[in-house]
Image (cartoon, helix red, strand yellow):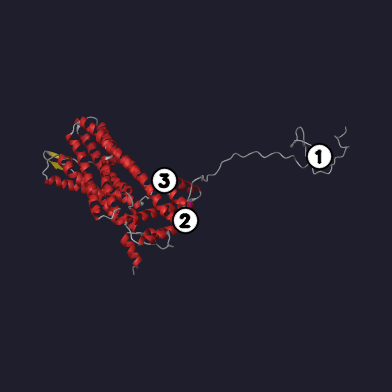
Amino acid sequence: MTSVAELARRRNGLPRRRAVSSRPWWQRLLRSGWTWLLVGATVVFAAALAAQWQIITADIPVKGGVVEGVNAAAIRTSAWLALPTLAAWTAIFLLADRFRPQRLAIWYLAVGWGGAIATFLAIHVNTWASQHLSIAGDGDPASSARVGIFVAPFVEEAAKATVLFAIAILARYRLTSKISMIVLAGLSAAGFAFTENIVYYSRVIVYSSQNIGVGNADAALAQIVLLRGVLTAFAHPLFTMMTGIGLAVALRTRSKVVRVLAPLVGYLAAAGGHMLFNSQQVVSDGHAQIVLYFAVALPMVLGAFIYVIRQVLAEGRRIRTRLGDYVQLGWLPAADQIVNAKLRTRLWALLVGITHGPRVWWATLRLQRTLTELAYLRDGQVRGLYDQAATTRARELIEMAHQLRPLAIADPRGRRLNLPRLRRRQPSPYQPPRFPGPAGLGGNWPAPSQPAQLGSPGYSAVDPTWGPPKS
């Protein structure tokens, strides 16, 4: 039977208190709901990618002939060309999410959704819209200007952002800041751009190899890779970030009006920016596109970059302020709010911990995560997001921190890495022999520096009549 305290935790979205399990790790892994969620999501992602494979490899009948689909070799080559862009954006967003990083499963869901489900939805909805708009073209609905301007931006931004709302329902307690939502939105957009780039690159490979009028096929491929993979690689992450920011604002407020309007405004801003971006590719000439690129697009990217840095710094200040509340109560030492509010001290603590062994490193990591969760829990209490159930959770976190503190590196300031010191062996000083033996020229040991005294250990009575044999 579910207790009243457990119902209060569920109402606030707080995690339930877990008992210490004695089962081995593989049994805990099999019993975890996250494991089966990842397995089911992987199956769905694979099915969506397989359906898209069938679409882009099939021949499309058009007026006056047939447009051949792409082949497996072109898709394989395009995937390798699109992979660096995905890897770069993934590394950038994961580095930004350092104070309270999400589970690996949540990151995987965001990237997989954008790369498989969002692209699957976009290609079908765009095709359906182009058919109802009676658009004539070469068989590719996405090549039409009207679809690219008036349909695709709204469809693609909605498809990419759907996973953000699903994660907010599934793990609302972990979405504690704008950085969290920006990172998840960027990962979903990076996955979407990865699959979309594969489709575009593959079509260029096939088209340039079949039409002699293209000229140098390698140059045509290099041009589109430079355009989509480098120069305009920011487009999808930049637009989807706007929806993520709107959703983050909605999750950290008590106002019902803001909870409804903030995600809607973020989505409309993302779709509007996407629409403007696509329209300039169609209606502007080469010179105008260059001007807009340097005068509008790059300043927007720079502004987004500065905004993310400011949010990271703001998260550090928020952690310091909220942990300071517990320091004033005497529940935490004063060093906790200073160490955990700066990324460099947190990183240095982990580096010092790993040099003391894996147990110390793991305890240090758990201590940092516990105190960070405590800070965000307190921030939610101040904002009015939680009721008295959060107080019980806070006591559990403080108790956990006290248990981890003796083993963890709680304050790394002034500490050094525990590395083995490689020193050159010093030669041992020579000690004169304490036993009789040959000395002098050709001897095994040098003669003693001082003559042996009578009765000393080095003294040896010698017959004075001893000498070489007489002839």
**How far is the residue under mark 3 from the one under mark 1?**
70 Å
Instruction: Return the x and y of residue 213 as percentages of the image width and height.
Output: 19, 30
Instruction: Give the SS element for disc 2.
Output: helix
CB atoms of marks 2 and 1 within 8 Å? no
Q: Earlier in the sequence, mark 2 or mark 1?
A: 2
Count neighbours of disc 3 (C-alpha within 10 A) and say few if under 14, some if 14 to 19, many if 20 or more.
Answer: some
Q: Position of residue 282 (x, y in %)?
A: 18, 36
Which mark is first along the chain, 1 or 3? 3
Disc ID at residue 404: 2
Q: Nearer the viewer, residue 11 or 418?
A: 11
- Figure quadrant of the N terminus: bottom left
Mark found first going from the N terminus, 2 or 3: 3
Which stretch is magenta?
403-408
Is residue 306 in view from this perspective?
yes
Residue identifier under label 1: 452
The residue carrying mark 3 is: 343
Q: Residue furthest bottom?
A: 1
Looking at the picture, which amino acid does disc 2 mark? Leu
Give the amino acid type for the residue marked by disc 1 in the picture. Answer: Ala
Residue 379's place in the image compared with 147, above or below, is: below
Q: Of all residues shown, which one is farthest toward the front?
A: 328
Which mark is in front, 2 or 1? 2
Quick check: 184 left or right of 451?
Answer: left
